[in-house]
Amino acid sequence: FAESAAPRPLAGRRAVVTSGPTVEAIDPVRFIANRSSGKQGHAVAAALAALGAEVTLVSGPVTIPDPAGVRMVRVESARDMLAACQAALPADILVCAAAVADWRVEAADQKLKKQPGGAPPALVLSENPDILATLSQAGARRPRLVVGFAAETETVVEHAVAKRRRKGCDWILANDVSPATGTFGGDDNTLHLITDHGVEDWPRLTKQAAAERLAARIAEALAAASPKEPA
Ligand code: CTP
Ligand code: CA
């Protein structure tokens, strides 16, 4: 079969997806990062592209391969990730799946050195920009459908409902990342989709299957909001 025979309900739509960790420099040789593998965000980017969307994937450093058919933008810090997302707008769809570092370090220009007999250095932290909140509240630049993830380790849905309201995104996928679930770095996810219409519990799915389900839901939502001209 020709590739064009596959249904492409997101043809003509632009999407930006964030994925992976961000890394925040302490000095020229050290950094703070987190355990995000990028698997879920990369799978979302691939699934949107498979439905025909033109996808920019803005990713922190990961070891997994680039998905097929997306434009890759590699970043390190949260501030770089925000700038790369802004540069990729306008878009119809934004999915923020990155595990963005909440804080950055006031980085030293030179490598920090041990002081013989001295105290360890104190890291001075400042809060990073919230990419999801910033772009959810971006006025005319706001993508039509903004989707976040909420990584929680307790009262998962309650925290995610509050997070959706606080940030101003349309949908949030609540994700239990407590260590027993093996979500970080693992291949499966148990998600709850929170929208204006309430909470939908999804079964435990592979990250790829969850991504395909999300991409299909996004295609439905956009088609309902602005049906395309009949061909
Ligand atoms: N996010 C973001 N920029 C940040 C922090 C988070 O874009 N600086 C996005 C994540 O990509 C995710 C959502 O916001 O889609 C929720 O991230 P999460 O870490 O769960 O929430 P926080 O608001 O950072 O709250 P906390 O970590 O305290 O639970
Ligand atoms: Ca956070």
Image (cartoon, rainbow, N blue to C red):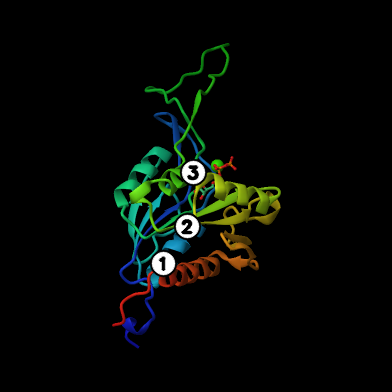
**In the rendered structure, which amino acid carries the disc numbered 1?**
Leu
Residue 77 in view in this figure: no
Q: Which residue is mark 2?
A: 41
Residue at image location 48% in from the left, 46% down from the top:
21
| First along the sequence among labels 3 and 2 | 2
Q: Label 2, label 1: how many angstroms apart (C-alpha)? A: 11 Å
Instruction: Indicate the secondary structure of the residue bearing disc 2.
Output: helix
Q: Which residue is mark 3?
A: 100
* Left or right placement of residue 183 versus residue 229 in this view: right
Residue at image location 36% in from the left, 40% down from the top:
80
**In the rendered structure, which amino acid carries the disc numbered 3?**
Val
Residue 154: where, in percent of width, then height?
70, 48
Quarter in which the C terminus is drawn: bottom left
Residue 186: where, in percent of width, then height?
59, 58
Q: Label 1, label 3: how many angstroms apart (C-alpha)? A: 21 Å
Query: Image height check: is 116 above or below 6?
Result: above
Query: Image height check: is 225 above or below 100?
Result: below
Instruction: Indicate the secondary structure of the residue bearing disc 3.
Output: loop
Q: Please tell me which residue lies in front, 228 or 64.
A: 228
